[in-house]
Image (cartoon, helix red, strand yellow):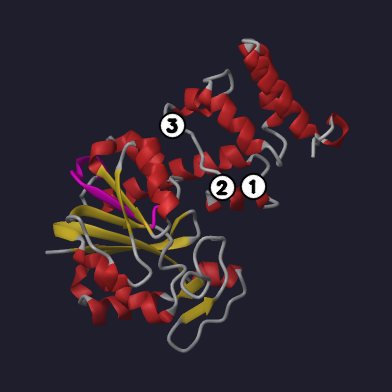
Amino acid sequence: MTTTPSALSAGQRLLQEGQDLLAQGDRVGAAQVLVRARDERDVVLAAHALIEKHDLVGSFNNVMGLDCTISEHDDIFGFFRGHHSSRNPLRDYLADGWRTLSELMLLLEAVDQPLLKMPRVLEFASGHGRFTRHLVKALGPERVVVSDVVPSAVEFSRTTFGVNGFLSASVPEDVQWPGSYDLVFVLSLFSHLPRATWSRWLAVLYEAVAPGGLLVVSTHGIKAANFDHVTLDEEGYFFAASSESTAIDEQEYGTTFTSEAFVLARIAETLGADKLVHKSPVHFWNHQDAYVLRKP
């Protein structure tokens, strides 16, 4: 069935006009129209893709100096696009990755192992590159490896950013590490894990750390629990089978809150308390606690 112009939304009409102008070779006119289309939620990603692909005036690539391509399967971008507080989801999404880079760099400075001196970095549970693009700008693609349980996420980062990548697994012990890494960065995985795999993932991820290297993880701590009006159990733990992910089973990847005491106890019984070298409450996004562990 053919869609008539009157049946199109305002965003769809702008998107079509922009495509027509591109086909005519009018880059200036196309840029002006597509920037307007980018403000419409129903076509924001399609308009963004055209602006970035054709390097038009208004592209984020020209502003940030990195590849700003966003996958249509990116759940994190979907979260920003659907959140009532995000007036500009593209800018918020891209700025959020940059913010994560600065927060990670500050954290590593605190333990005297600067990010820029890390020869080999693994970003685990990397998603569709919200942070990867910024890590690549800092280190270059040859020093970055990504891993995720979602195949399209790994393939997108490999194709778009030029990094190496491999599939993770739903069962922690099934992950096959291609090598060891000076930094294993695990942002917001432990804030989603059920109790049955929480400590198991901690143990398995530590195995991927090279001698003298670091494992950095983040959690939803007390501030996050209080903000969401969550009551922790006697261990200091809470899990709800719900998250922003549409690709992973909610029983495997929900929303988790943990007290500092819970995290420290799991580190002590799983790896040994001496492996923790630094902790920073509400470090990432002023919302998640950070823990840094070192392998001797």
What is the distance, in whole Å, between disc 3 and disc 2 at their CAs?
A: 15 Å
- Mark 1 or 3 closer to N-term? 3
Q: Residues within 10 Å of mark 1 (few under 14, many from 20)?
A: many
Cα gap from disc 2 to disc 1, whole angstroms: 6 Å
Task: Identify the residue position indicated by label 2 in the image.
Answer: 77
What segment carries the magenta color?
Answer: 115-126
Residue furthest to the right: 6
Magenta stretch: residue 122 in it?
Answer: yes
SS class, disc 3: loop
Q: Are marks 2 and 1 in contact (CB under 8 Å)?
A: yes
Query: Tag 2's secondary structure?
Result: helix
Measured from the top left, where is residue 296 in percent x and y?
11, 64
Q: What residue type is labelled 3?
A: Asp
Q: Residue at x 27, y 48 (%)?
A: 109
Name which quarter of the figure residue 72 lies in. top right
The amino acid pointed to by label 2 is Phe
* Residue receiving disc 1: 81
- In the rendered structure, which amino acid carries the disc numbered 1? Arg
Which image quarter: residue 88? top right
Residue 190 occupies quadrant:
bottom left
- Quarter of the image for the N terminus: give it: top right
In the rendering, which numbered label is found on residue 67? 3
